[in-house]
Amino acid sequence: MIVKSAEFICSNTQISKLPPPVKPEYAFIGRSNVGKSSLINMLTGKKGLAKTSQTPGKTQLINHFLINDNWYIVDLPGYGYARISKSKKEDWNKFIRTYLDKRESLQCVMVLIDSRLEPQKIDLEFCNWLGEKGLPFALVFTKADKQSSIKTDQNIAKFKKALLATFDEVPSYFVTSAELHTGRDEVLGFIAEINQNFVVPDFSAEFYK
Ligand SMILES: Nc1nc2c(ncn2[C@@H]2O[C@H](COP(=O)(O)OP(=O)(O)OP(=O)(O)O)[C@@H](O)[C@H]2O)c(=O)[nH]1
Ligand SMILES: [Mg+2]
């Protein structure tokens, strides 16, 4: 897929203020600082599109970006950020989980996993929650430039094995580096294929007012 245009549309805390669900949408989610915003910038080829930061907790809202006037990338706040208060964490849970569970046009949740780490409980729990809700997801291993490909492969193998404790099969997965542009064609190709089969879902026009 060639990305001809990528534009910021809106930031939201309210689900009813999101754009009407008439275009296919892909949510990028993962632990705080895993590289969600960097990956979005790499995929779109626009450096400053999504705000990145060395400080975890940068992205706080549901951010919609329209690609090629045809589909949405959604940048979400990270989970598992230790320094936010308990009540804020609960807010995160409610708000993001409601978005993921209810968004009619959401085609696939792109779950970002830090390729440098052994399987983390919080990531596995999140995948299991997606599985329970029947939400399609793919794994995107990030920051692959930070260690040898052998180490990356070992961590991916461990993650797959851990998932197989609760899933019958491993979902699609991608190895990426925002730094080296690794995995760009693969992730965009995956999305392009799903976009081809998109049918505008039933939704309440009253709700999105
Ligand atoms: N070397 C390397 N660094 C990366 C890569 N992706 C992200 N980073 C760095 O990791 C840090 C966090 O990146 P962000 O893209 O802001 O992460 P995020 O997941 O959006 O973070 P929050 O919005 O705070 O949850 C930044 O310092 C990035 O430069 C990568 O592929 N390679
Ligand atoms: Mg971010």
Image (cartoon, rainbow, N blue to C red):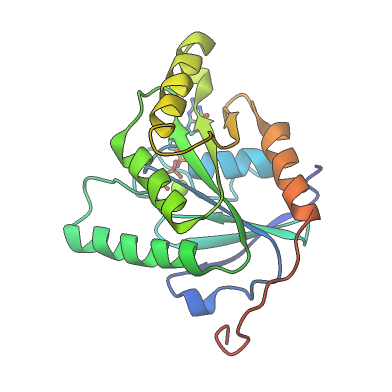
Q: Residue furthest left?
A: 86
Task: Choose between 6 and 106: the one closer to the eye.
Answer: 106
Q: How many marks?
A: 0
Q: Percent position (x, y) of residue 134?
A: 50, 55
Where residue 53 sits, quadrant-wise, is top left
Q: Percent position (x, y) of residue 112?
A: 48, 39
Q: Percent position (x, y) of residue 8?
A: 62, 61
Task: Choose between 25 and 159: the one closer to the eye.
Answer: 159
Residue lying at 71% horizontally and 65% vertically, measured from the top left: 23
Q: Which quarter of the figure is the C terminus placed in?
A: bottom right
Task: Choose between 92 and 109: the one closer to the eye.
Answer: 109
Q: Residue furthest front?
A: 168
Residue lying at 37% horizontally and 24% vertically, measured from the top left: 117
Q: Percent position (x, y) of residue 162?
A: 38, 29
Where residue 85 sits, quadrant-wise, is bottom left
Rendered view: 63 above or below 184: below
Q: Residue furthest bottom?
A: 206
Horizontal arrangement in the rendering, residue 186 relative to residue 103 (left or right): right
Q: Which quarter of the figure is the N terminus placed in?
A: top right
Residue lying at 60% horizontally and 36% vertically, measured from the top left: 172
Horizontal arrangement in the rendering, residue 203 relative to residue 69 (left or right): left
Horizontal arrangement in the rendering, residue 6 relative to residue 111 (left or right): right
